[in-house]
Amino acid sequence: MRETILKRLGNLLSVKSIVTLALTVVFAGMAMQQAISQDFMTIYAVIIAFYFGTQSQKVQDAVEGGNGNG
């Protein structure tokens, strides 16, 4: 249990995660001020899509590798 928590915290410290979390904080602040520009929204959407796309790919690879076919 403790090893799992430490591993997850370690994964959060990756550059990709730090950038995603920082942009999410900035997005939340801008949303509260109602000051989100179209350019920022486009960049944010691309980064979030990339982040969750790579996460889902990791899960899919793990499932395919774990079922004996890969």
Image (tube, helix red, strand yellow):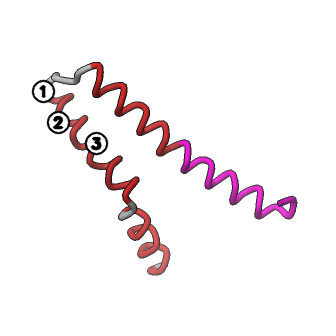
Residue position for label 2: 29
Q: Secondary structure at mark 2?
A: helix
Q: Secondary structure at mark 3?
A: helix
Q: Nearer the viewer, mark 3 or mark 2?
A: 3
Q: Amino acid at mark 1?
A: Gln
Q: Amino acid at mark 3?
A: Leu
| Magenta segment, prevailing SS (helix, strand or loop) | helix
Say whether disc 3 or disc 1 marks the residue closer to the N-terminus. Answer: 3
Where 34 falls versus 23 (above or below)?
above
Residue, far left: 33
Which label was assigned to residue 33? 1
What are the residue bounds of the magenta stretch?
A: 53-70
- As for residue 20 lying within the magenta part, the answer is no
Which label was assigned to residue 23? 3
Which label was assigned to residue 67? none
Q: Are marks 1 and 2 in contact (CB under 8 Å)?
A: yes
Tell me if 1 is positioned left or right of 24 in this view: right
Where 62 falls versus 33 (above or below)?
below
Who's the residue at 47% across and 45% down the image? Answer: 51
Q: Amino acid at mark 2?
A: Gly
Who's the residue at 22% across and 24% down the image? Answer: 36
Who's the residue at 18% across and 31% down the image? Answer: 30
Q: CA–CA distance between discs 3 and 1?
A: 15 Å
Tell me if 60 is positioned left or right of 13 in this view: right
Q: Residues within 10 Å of mark 3 (few under 14, many from 20)?
A: some
Q: Are marks 3 and 1 in contact (CB under 8 Å)?
A: no
Where 2 falls versus 16 (above or below)?
below
